[in-house]
């Protein structure tokens, strides 16, 4: 009797992280100082374990004051810069230390965005937890689960639709095990952690889940 092996691709997750004003990140600083989008990022360690040589393009016609990087080339898209980034302060290095290569990096208005693919939700949880220990404002802006609910094989969840309070409630409930089976925490415990009433918790969770799960439910009909 043959058994069907689970498809590891079905557990794959595509993640977009947003880090607001990350400390000592030249890309985020450049996007603020130049008032322009930073993209086309290329990185190499050059054999060093402590620093990374990073190049990026700022979408502007002229060099901007305050950018802590050396202008090296002018392209049709803007000005190309190069700088050295310390590994211990680089969110990209942190993500990749978990075995998930970052496939896209860009910065807008001081916020750094990273896109990567993780083998499962547990790896995403570990990366986000580690990022939040090092950086002040880390949010999952987009989460796509590999699956069969939509024609292209992905279910996309846009967490940007959530309010800051709804994200806090969902994150706290998730981290405390409210959604686990069996539950790691009940509604009263989560509400106490957030210093709100259980009824208010229920309202926040209902609103957040409707925003997050609505697109998934509609695609599955």
Image: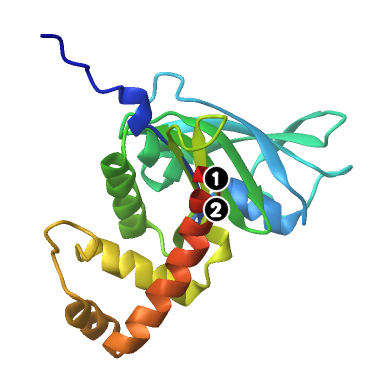
Left or right, 36 with reference to 108 = right
Query: Is 37 above or below relative to 79?
Result: below
Q: Which residue is drawn at 82% across and 37% down?
A: 78
In front of the other: 3 or 127:
3
The answer for how far apart the CA atoms under marks 2 and 1 are is 6 Å
Percent coordinates x, y for residue 109 in the rendering = 68, 58
Residue 175, percent from left and from top = 25, 62
Q: Which residue corresponds to the image point at 57% horizontal and 50% vertical from the top-left?
A: 112
Residue at image coords 53%, 72% = 163
As displayed, is residue 207 above or below residue 180? Answer: below
Name the element at disc 2: helix
Q: Can residue 21 be seen in this view?
A: no
Is there CB contact under 8 Å for labels 2 and 1? yes
User: Of the numbered discs in the image, which one, if any, rests on residue 219?
Assistant: 1
Q: In which quarter of the image is residue 56?
A: top right
The quarter of the image holding the N terminus is top left
Mark 1 neighbour density, 10 Å: few (under 14) some (14–19) many (20 or more): few
Q: Name the residue under label 2.
A: 215
Which residue is more in the foreground, 158 or 87? 158
Who is closer to the viewer here, 122 or 26?
Answer: 122
Quadrant hosting residue 123: top left
* Left or right of residue 65: residue 193: left
Of residues 25 and 102, the one drawn nearer to the viewer in this rendering: 102
């Amino acid at each position: 009797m043959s058994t069907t092996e689970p498809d590891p691709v079905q557990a794959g997750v595509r993640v977009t992280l947003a880090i607001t004003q990350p400390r000592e990140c030249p890309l985020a600083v450049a996007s603020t100082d130049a008032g322009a989008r930073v993209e086309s990022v290329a990185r190499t360690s050059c054999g060093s374990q402590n620093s990374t040589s990073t190049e990026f393009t700022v979408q502007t016609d002229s060099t901007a004051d305050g950018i802590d990087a050396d202008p090296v080339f002018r392209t049709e898209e803007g000005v190309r810069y190069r700088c050295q980034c310390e590994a211990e302060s680089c969110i990209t290095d942190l993500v990749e230390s978990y075995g998930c290569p970052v496939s896209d990096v860009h910065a807008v208005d001081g916020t750094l965005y990273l896109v990567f693919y993780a083998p499962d939700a547990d790896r995403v949880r570990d990366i986000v937890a580690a990022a939040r220990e090092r950086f002040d404002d880390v949010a999952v802006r987009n989460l796509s689960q590999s699956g069969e609910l939509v024609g292209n094989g992905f279910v996309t969840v846009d967490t940007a639709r959530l309010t800051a309070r709804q994200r806090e409630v969902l994150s706290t409930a998730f981290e405390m095990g409210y959604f686990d089976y069996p539950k790691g925490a009940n509604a009263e415990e989560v509400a106490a952690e957030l210093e709100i009433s259980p009824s208010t918790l229920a309202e926040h969770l209902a609103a957040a889940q409707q925003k997050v799960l609505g697109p998934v439910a509609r695609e599955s009909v």
